[in-house]
Amino acid sequence: MMKKINDKQLRQLKLSANSKLNALRKTQGDRFKPTNLDLKGYWELLIVIDSLLAVCILASQQEEYDRAKLVPKEHIGKCLELARDLLPFEEGEFLDEAYQLFQKTSE
């Protein structure tokens, strides 16, 4: 039998959500944008996009190729940095807290 969430638990959950669910920012309608991308400007954005494209080209190659000539290490590094920046660690903490609360109420 599932227990009802009390007001104190709900306030704790809301407080946690407000402080940790911040990897996405709501835009128009039902759309969201990542908030944790920190770029110096358009030039850096273009470099990151170019790096992503270069790594995709590398991944799509079916014949033999010289990796060092096709994709410089900087491109791969930029892609890995972007992937790391997009990981929603704080959201993961919130989900753990919400799950623990759910477990308590379902006992």
Image: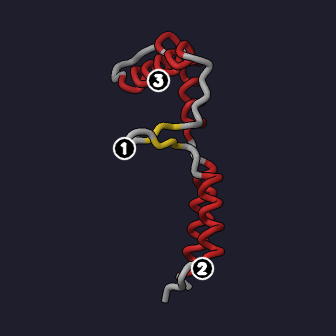
Q: Is residue 77 positioned above or below 91 on the image?
A: above
Kind of element beneath mark 1:
loop
Q: Is residue 19 positioned above or below 29 on the image?
A: below
Point out which mark residue 6 bears: 2
Residue at the location (47% across, 20% down)? Answer: 49
Q: Are marks 2 and 1 in contact (CB under 8 Å)?
A: no
- Between residues 47 and 101, which one lies in front from this camera angle? 101
Q: Position of residue 30 (x, y in %)?
A: 37, 46
Q: Position of residue 12 (x, y in %)?
A: 65, 67
Report how far apart the C-alphas of labels 1 and 3 lie in the structure.
28 Å
Residue at the location (41% across, 24% down)? Answer: 56
Q: Which residue lies under the disc numbered 3?
A: 52
Residue at the location (46% across, 23% down)? Answer: 52
Residue at the location (49% across, 16% down)? Answer: 46
- Tell me where residue 80 sits by quadrant: top right
Look at label 2 and name its amino acid: Asn
Look at label 1 and name its amino acid: Gly
- Tell me where residue 15 sits by quadrant: bottom right
Mark 2 or 1, nearer chain start:
2
Density class for disc 3 (Cα within 10 Å; few <14, some 14-19, many ≥20) is some
Q: Are marks 1 and 3 in contact (CB under 8 Å)?
A: no
Report how far apart the C-alphas of labels 3 and 2 lie in the structure.
47 Å
Kind of element beneath mark 2:
loop
- Tell me where residue 59 sits by quadrant: top left
Kind of element beneath mark 3:
helix
Q: Nearer the viewer, mark 1 or mark 3?
A: 1
Q: Which residue lies under the disc numbered 1?
A: 29
